Amino acid sequence: MNPLDQVLEAMARTRSEREACYRDLHSHPEPSMREERTRAVVTERLLALGCEVVELGGGLVTVLANGDGPVVLHRADMDGLPVTEETGLPYASTQTTVDATGAEVGLMHACGHDLHVACLLGAVELLASRPDAWSGTFIAVFQPGEEIAAGGRAMVDAGITTRVPRPDVAFGQHVLSHEAGVLGTRVGPVMSAGDSIRITVFGKGSHGSMPHLGVDPVVLAASIVLRLQTIVAREISPSDFAVVTVGSSRAGSTSNVIADHATLLVNLRTYDTGVRDQVVAAIERIVRAECEASGSPRPPTFEYYEQYPLTSNDPDVTDTVTAAFRAHLGAGRVVDLGRVPASEDFSVIPDAFGTPYTYWGVGGFPPGAGVPNHSPLFAPLIQPTLDAGTEAIVVAAMAYLAPEAA
């Protein structure tokens, strides 16, 4: 039996325990940067395996040091989303949280982070059970706060680059709406850069019956929303990619009062730094021009937040991992992931180390019946998704850690 098969030999024996762990995590999602129970569950399981656990920046790190050889890092994110679950699953979340407006809403693992955690725990268990089959170091990182682009930076700020060995390669994965059990890889840009902008424009308050005495920020905001739609349609080359979305427009509180300000929450996604800069400049130009045209009494303000870097897979690492996936799983289970316009802060940690990385997708749904991430109906099939994600981590790691890989 080859070293990879030796490590994977316990997959069937550990399957029911991994499934139970996944169901428990799914039932108990936690808000970004407040993943206390999740940390406790992960810590308990790692300690039971004999691992040492270090808490950094709200996340956890464990290092399996097993002699000479490459250093491999894999990261899993842990946080849930303010989404009320509608899956009807027997293990559906009943947790609640407070959203940005102060309203109580449901809390759900609507992006598969529960599966990411369960897969990484399973991979650690498999590798720890067969130290005779590999040599080197495996670092498991359980990261908080991905959904608000805060967790990776928090762990870097807490000193992860000085607390663990520098990895030679870094991996991450994400469950997506593709066919369950299928893995998707891609060289180069795969997850877009993302920026959120809180734009405040100012009017002049007045009675609703006396609009001529005020400056209406609702009309001003509406003009901005419409004009922003022209950026991608008329300013960005058709050969380039960009998305500009106005996700929220808020002003006033009653029908007969003209408010004195309006707030827009704008999100943009790009794959190219130059295109991003062009879009940002266009947004600010349009907002300022519309404010001037409306006679706004104050300049607008722009607050940039939840900024995600581009996820761009290293060619050599991606080719190595893709070849390992195909050799073990068969070419039919490994597809071109394509570009995914969602964003990730996965690359923050490997970039802090200066480490090349690759990030792949794991399908989680019946063919043709995928549900998009962040949907209240997001419910990946437990199997074969959980086994596929666990196996993918081990296969990728063993591409570097197996004796013949040295």
Image (cartoon, helix red, strand yellow):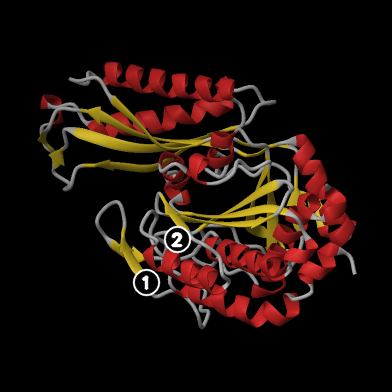
**Above or below: residue 25 compared with residue 74:** below
As drawn, the label of residue 80 is: 2
Q: Which residue is drawn at 67% across and 52% down?
A: 137
Disc 2, SS: loop
Give percent across and percent down for residue 4. Answer: 82, 63
Please tell me in which quadrant of the rendered image residue 351 appears. top right
First reached walking from the N terminus: tag 2 or tag 1? 2
Give percent across and percent down for residue 214. Answer: 14, 27
As drawn, the label of residue 388 is: none
Give percent across and percent down for residue 67. Answer: 71, 54
Q: Residue at x 13, y 41 (%)?
A: 257
Give percent across and percent down for residue 81. Answer: 43, 59
Please tell me in which quadrant of the rendered image residue 16 appears. bottom right
Disc 1, SS: loop
Q: Residue at x 84, y 49 (%)?
A: 405
Distance from Cα at disc 2 to Cα at disc 1:
10 Å
Kind of residue indicated by mark 1: Gln
Q: Residue at x 57, y 36 (%)?
A: 353
From the viewer's side, name the closer residue of 312 and 13: 13
**Residue 244 at least partly seen:** no
**Residue 172 at least partly seen:** yes
- In the image: residue 384, left or right of residue 284: right
Crowding around mark 2 (Cα neighbors within 10 Å: few <14, some 14 to 19, many 20+) is: many
Q: In which quarter of the image is the N terminus?
A: bottom right
Kind of residue indicated by mark 2: Gly
Crowding around mark 1 (Cα neighbors within 10 Å: few <14, some 14 to 19, many 20+) is: some
**Above or below: residue 165 compared with residue 31:** above
Q: Do the residues labelled 2 and 1 touch (CB within 8 Å)?
A: yes
Q: Label 1 belongs to which residue?
A: 95
Give the tally of numbered discs: 2
